[in-house]
Image (cartoon, rainbow, N blue to C red):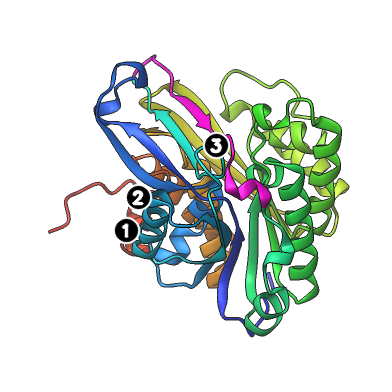
């Protein structure tokens, strides 16, 4: 993939930041008293591997002025080596603006994970392109890749329009557009017609499209894979056929990725992926992995994929590295991979869990 040569940021990412709180020791939310808190958004998660490994990543977002939660988010992002810019707006009283709370039960064994989204009054739902100096950001500074996900694109009519406009401006100045579909039924309820239109418009501008087993079907109305044999491995050919249909619908896109997950229990999944780059297939067949917390595994995959593309590696290594960063995200309570080095990720891919002294 040929990337823009003159840029300040490897990635620029529109997002709405919030916090996630997770019970310690994988306990259920309804019985827990002690929680771990982190800053979070699906989009910032995708910027984490590049940021951790020395690349410049900037978020375009919005904050509540003088909010303790906003200050926590900013400090956490700085510690994660992620830059940000965005307006600060007055809270407007106790029923005014806020940052989202994501309350997550990691699950255990056959007790499944559960996520409670508390997003009423979320400040990021009001994002507007007029709040940003787009000529400076996308022309003078520039970004190699502009990434967005279906979560920010589906949050509100305002963010749907914001994402479309950001993609249009970024594309004009030579950035590649990455779109992780990230379909969520709760976001789409009673908005299907509106969101199908918005998502298809963004997909038409995308150079990189990412989905899971259902995203392409539900977000873009692409026919899904035909029933295959038992288990996710037996269905890989069906997913390839589905991706071929996506490629036909969006012929200007260069990279199509589809993660594969089969849940054995909350503690163990089969994890794999397929990738199509300029009509060439690259497959990482599902392998059983141990899971501490599954949330963010897909974001971790996309984050590793972005890093691989930005590094200019051969596409055969993209899917391997991305598989490993997704796997790594499942080993921590944070919903992102924060690797020490490329070597650490390749050790994960190779299954080398021997102690390093």
Q: Residue at x 63, y 42 (%)?
A: 151
Residue 292 shows up from this direction: no
Residue 129 in which image quadrant: bottom right
Residue closer to the observer: 110 or 114: 114
Callout 3: helix, strand or loop?
A: loop
The residue that disc 1 covers is 344
Cα–Cα span, label 3 and label 1: 45 Å
Q: Are marks 1 and 2 in contact (CB under 8 Å)?
A: yes
The dot on residue 102 is none
Q: Is residue 294 left or right of residue 229?
A: left
The quarter in which the C terminus is drawn is bottom left
Q: Residue at x 71, y 58 (%)?
A: 128
Q: Is residue 118 magenta?
A: yes
Crowding around mark 1 (Cα neighbors within 10 Å: few <14, some 14 to 19, many 20+) is some
Cα–Cα span, label 2 and label 3: 46 Å
Q: Residue at x 67, y 32 (%)?
A: 187
Q: Position of residue 271 (x, y in %)?
A: 48, 36
Q: Is residue 79 left or right of residue 34?
A: right
Callout 2: helix, strand or loop?
A: helix
Crowding around mark 3 (Cα neighbors within 10 Å: few <14, some 14 to 19, many 20+) is few
Q: Does residue 257 sit above or below 129 in this rendering?
A: above
The dot on residue 348 is 2
Residue 188 in which image quadrant: top right
**Mark 2 vs mark 3: in front:** 3
Cα–Cα span, label 1 and label 2: 7 Å
The residue that disc 3 covers is 95
Per the rendered image, the range of residues in magenta is 109-126
Q: Position of residue 204 (x, y in %)?
A: 84, 54
Residue 264 in which image quadrant: top left
């Amino acid at each position: 993939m040929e990337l823009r040569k003159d840029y300040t940021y490897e990635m620029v990412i529109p997002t709405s930041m919030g916090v996630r709180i997770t019970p310690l020791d994988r306990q259920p939310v309804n019985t827990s008293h002690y929680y771990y808190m982190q800053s979070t958004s699906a989009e910032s998660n995708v910027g984490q591997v590049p940021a951790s490994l020395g690349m410049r990543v900037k978020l375009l977002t919005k904050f509540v002025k003088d909010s303790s939660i906003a200050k926590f988010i900013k400090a956490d992002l700085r510690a994660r080596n992620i830059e940000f810019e965005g307006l600060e707006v007055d809270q407007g009283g106790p029923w005014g603006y806020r940052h989202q709370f994501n309350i997550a039960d990691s699950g255990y064994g056959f007790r499944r994970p559960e996520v409670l989204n508390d997003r009423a009054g979320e400040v990021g739902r009001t994002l507007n392109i007029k709040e940003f100096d787009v000529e400076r950001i996308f022309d003078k500074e520039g970004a190699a890749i502009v990434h967005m996900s279906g979560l920010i694109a589906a949050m509100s009519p305002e963010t749907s329009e914001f994402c479309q406009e950001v993609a249009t401006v970024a594309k004009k100045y030579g950035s590649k557009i990455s779109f992780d579909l990230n379909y969520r039924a709760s976001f789409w309820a009673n908005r299907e017609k509106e969101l199908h239109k918005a998502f298809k418009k963004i997909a038409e501008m995308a150079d990189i499209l990412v989905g899971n087993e259902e995203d392409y079907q539900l977000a873009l109305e692409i026919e899904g894979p035909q029933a295959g044999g038992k288990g996710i491995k037996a269905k890989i050919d069906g997913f390839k056929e589905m991706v071929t249909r996506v490629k036909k619908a969006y012929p200007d896109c260069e990279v199509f990725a589809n993660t594969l997950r089969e849940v054995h229990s909350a503690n163990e999944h089969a994890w794999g992926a397929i990738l199509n780059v300029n009509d060439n297939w690259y497959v990482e067949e599902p392998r059983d992995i141990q899971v501490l917390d599954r949330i963010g595994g897909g974001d971790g995959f996309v984050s590793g994929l972005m890093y691989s593309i930005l590094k200019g590696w051969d596409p055969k290594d993209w899917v391997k590295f991305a598989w490993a960063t997704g796997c790594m995200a499942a080993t921590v309570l944070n919903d992102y991979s924060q690797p020490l080095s490329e070597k650490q990720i390749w050790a994960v891919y190779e299954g080398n869990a021997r102690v390093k002294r």
